[in-house]
Amino acid sequence: MHEVWTYFTVHHSEIMGWLWTTVWLAGVPLVVGLLLALPIGWVASRYHWTYPPITSIAGLLYTIPSLVLFLVIPGILGTGILSPLNVAVALTGYTIALLVRTVADGLDSVSSDTMSAAAAMGYTGRQRLVAVQLPLAVPVIGAGLRVAAVSNVSLVSVASVIGVLQLGQLFVVGYDYNALAPTFLGLVLFVLLALAFDLVILGIVRVLTPWQRAVGRP
Amino acid sequence: MIRFESVTKRFGDGTVAVDDLSLEAPSGKITIFVGPSGCGKTTSLRMINRMLEPTSGRILLDDQDTASMDPATLRRGIGYVIQHAGLFPHRTIVDNVATVPMLLGEDKKKSRARAMELLERVGLDLKLAKRYPAQLSGGQQQRVGVARALAADPPVMLMDEPFSAVDPVVREQLQNEFLRLQGELGKTIAFVTHDIDEAIKLGDKVAVMRVGGRLAQFAEPAELLSRPSDAFVAGFVGRDRGYRALGFASAGGSLSTSEEDVARLGDDLRRANDMAQDGWTLVVDDKDQPQGWLALGGLSGSALDGTVTPDLLNLGGTLAGQDGTLREALDAALSSPSGRGVIVDSDGRFVGTVTPGEVLEHIESRAAGIRRNTLASAKGQRAHA
Amino acid sequence: MSVLADGAGLPGLSHVITWFNDPSNWWGSSGLLIRIREHLLYALIILLIAIVIALPLGLFVGHTGRGVVVVVGLANGLRAIPTLGLVIYLYLWLSTKITTTFAVPWLVDRGALASFVSVMIALVLLALPPILTSTYAGVQNVDPAARDAASGMGMTGAQVVRKVELPCALPLIMSGIRSAALQVIATVTVAAYLPFLGGLGRYIKDGAGDLNNTQTGYPAMVAAGLTVAILAVVVDALFNLLQRALVSPGLTGRIKRDSRRTTVDRIDAPAEANLISA
């Protein structure tokens, strides 16, 4: 434990740099992916015939290993193979793939009674979506977002296999120098980072859904 | 016979679901447990096959203490039907029914043959046998549930709100078929419902339970209606019970009917009009089955050219069976547009008509007889004491 | 092939086709076919071990309702651990303990045991959560009325699990195993990070050191990556067939039914993705 701390203090600035890269690489795709998944998921929920093809394509995207995307994207985008942009683009793709289904299911999960009541009160279609359906779908979408966040954080480390610099570099260093301390530190930081993402999303969901706390869910 | 001896069930959180219940459900009869939600009726039922264990007291099946039997063995000998049928979604209908015989060690072929026999017996279209539960309607699923419970030919059946989840029309159909089936099979049945009308219709004996798991009254349906033991039972049995009690009083030939000239479909309108009493003529078909009332009072001249057709008939008015109940007879009389209730025989052929006054007169003279008997027996009891 | 322009001086993707067209890259003791065999063999062993652990545990938790918090917490915690880091950590630790030169033909070369065990442990831990949670959730989702009827008709606890809960939960269990399989196939590539181990990751690890080599550099890496993707798609398809063979039509929504859309129609979606890897 002492060694781990020592390692951290000595390589402090380098590690913090990698940490921020990791936060950025995991976080930005999450936000962009969500913004893109919302309209696509809405289409899948609004026009039910589009649900099977959209979710099938999303499912197919999953079966492509992340490493393959990290390798192929530079060939297509013309970015360098070590560019973090490849990782960001790949993770955005995964986030969309995962969230499209969640958004569609979340919007569908709002009871038709509620939607009919909203229509009867005179909400227009767009008002119903924004003021009623979307807020009520937040818990489901939030749950999907948490899964995507944890997986994004974890996936960033895969990029170390090809050499993109981020926190996963601690594993590479540990292996190259046959040292447990940086490896262990890496594991801890990744888990903490995943936890932090999880808590932030959880907090946002709670703020957005005060009615769920009112019922006193455990 | 199922006997409860001072059975109490207290749950872990301290709530008493069943409190000192003692009663005996007779063999070959339907015993209904009825009461508001939280009265412990389902808990009582589930203690019979030991899905729940009593906290104290005993439950005996034909004088054998159920606590001394292996639960799984005990349950295999008791048919069990629940509200949502609980069919196994991954098995076809016939295999659902064949489950219990196979659990009892019967081979697949015999079990399936038995299953088909039972499906036919509960009135299910055998084309559905190879389907899966999800492809059946709620009513059909419930029939399968009953067939499955009957599969091992158990002497005892437990039924937990089996007809509650289907619509009223299907429910009535299922209830009637259930009574017909029980007429053939004569099982010892414990049946839970929250619907007092269902309890009165189906039960040979009815146990009314109140919240807190206490038995309020255990009696035959007619007695429940005529002599509720306390205000709770009276309230639970509800309004109109004097009228509903007529449902247990057979008209049984004792009700005299008046003859009536009837017209037939296709008869000349003028001829039908000549027959009318108070402006109304009853129309029957060629099998003598009543079709409706014809009212030609306001018409004359050329308006009466033509013949009696179904679209001219007033269909208001129910029919009462000659051997039906006084309730049916009174209803037929009250609902008839002509003021004359139509009585038919068991084949649906017209027998005669009764007026509400005639039915009421009959009811009153019958009630007077019952009152005399009650007074006599009350005197007798007091003399004994 | 002009679309596949050379990015930042890398050999273009057209070299990947050239690489695939060269028979010498397919055959031989370190050829593509051997690597595929190693890759699939590792994945299969990992998956089997994970199933043997997670299936009974998930059934137990689902049936009894005991230990739910522990299992769900464990599954979520395991997901947050990056597999690459865990593999390296386990190796650094085990390589000092395991010094035997024990070998298994086709699987473990002489001296590779520490590497092999590290990869096995780390990837089994990766494969556990999806199987565990889907089994548990599958059992939980079984219609309570069916379960009640099962014990009401006299099935023992074990019979209820075997005859009702397991078959009814099978669509979800299968989708959990499938997503575990896809994750494992994608992630076994990290095995190559350790000495003496093969699998398709070998090309990627080795190629990263000499990217511009048109034979063993970037083109070989992409070729190996594409092969992994193809394996994933094939395995996915196999699982679809397996699911059709094993799961009762009464559960899949393949049967004709009323236009009701029920949850069973949606079960065989890839649960939570294979992307929670490494």
Image: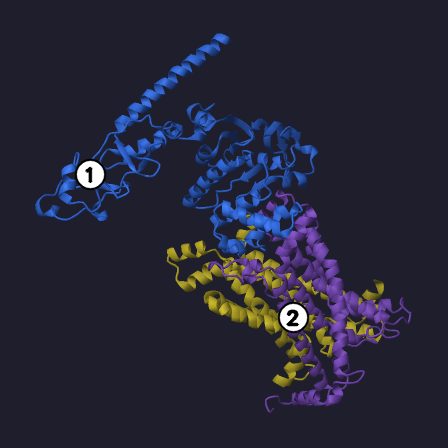
To which residue does mark 2 refer?
C238
The x and y percentages for residue A184 are 79, 66
User: Quarter of the image containing the C terminus of chain C?
Assistant: bottom right
Query: Is residue C143 shown to the viewer in this render?
Result: no
Residue at the image point whose x is 51% and y is 26% from the top? B218
Q: How many marks?
A: 2
Chain letter for purple, please: C
Tell me if I can see residue C246 in this picture. yes
**Residue C126 locus on image (x, y percent):** 72, 65
> Amino acid type of disc 2?
Leu
Label 1 neighbourhood size at 10 Å, few (<14), some (14-19), many (20+)? many
Q: Residue at x 52, y 71 (%)?
A: A53
Q: Which residue corresponds to the image point at 26% horizontal and 33% vertical from the top-left? A: B352
Q: Tell me the number on the disc at residue B281.
A: 1
The relative height of residue C143 versus residue A61 in the rendered view (above or below) is: above
Which chain letter matches label 1?
B
Query: Chain A shown in which color?
Result: yellow
Front position among marks 1 and 2: 1
Chain letter for the blue colouring in the rendering: B
